[in-house]
Amino acid sequence: MRALIRRYLAVVYETLLMLALTLSLTALYYLFVGEANSGLKRFGLQVLLYLAMGAYFVRCWVASGQTLASQTWRLRVVSASGGRLTLSAALLRYAVVSVLLLPAGLTLWWALIDPEHCFLHDRLLGTRIVRS
């Protein structure tokens, strides 16, 4: 259960980091593009934020298996064989996480019932979060 708590605390920390990133990028976007309350400008902002978060996560997972939050909590994402994720595996992980977070954070709730406390995206993709 401690491992699960550690993972959830890393998720909270990651959320705060993503909040800072989205606020900063949104401010810059508004500065250069103007208000993005509707239409193409709003869609452009959403795409920018999604791609920026994706670039952060994918880069971290490929380079070391650790984001800033997972470094703090001494966690690492590894492939089924225990190695680093390839670029394609990291991109797929980001896409699957994105989809599985939409229905009320399903992937996070899944860990409560999973026998090994894996998030649903890790269970589906064969990736694991281990202590580093």
Image (cartoon, rainbow, N blue to C red):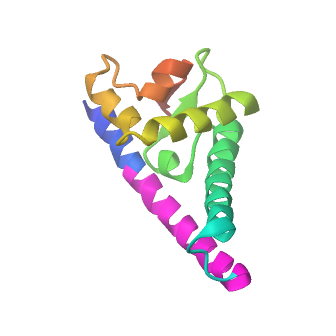
Residue at the location (55% across, 66% down)? Answer: 22
Q: Where 36 falls versus 96 (above or below)?
A: below
- Residue 86 shows up from this direction: no
User: Which of the image's four quarters has the N terminus?
Assistant: top left
Residue at the location (44% across, 42% down)? Answer: 102
Residue at the location (41% across, 47% down)? Answer: 10
Residue 113 magenta-highlighted: no
* 47 or 64: nearer the viewer: 47
Q: Which residues are magenta?
A: 12-33
Dividing the picture into quarters, in which one does residue 27 lie?
Answer: bottom right
Q: Main secondary structure of the magenta part?
A: helix
Dividing the picture into quarters, in which one does residue 33 lie?
Answer: bottom right
Dividing the picture into quarters, in which one does residue 91 lie?
Answer: top right
Q: Left of 117 or right of it: where is 80?
A: right
Q: Where 116 falls versus 69 (above or below)?
A: above
- Residue 128 shows up from this direction: yes
Residue at the location (49% across, 45% down)? Answer: 70
x, y percent for residue 108: 36, 36
Residue 15 magenta-highlighted: yes
Q: Left of 127 or right of it: where is 74?
A: left
Q: Left of 48 or right of it: where is 131?
A: left
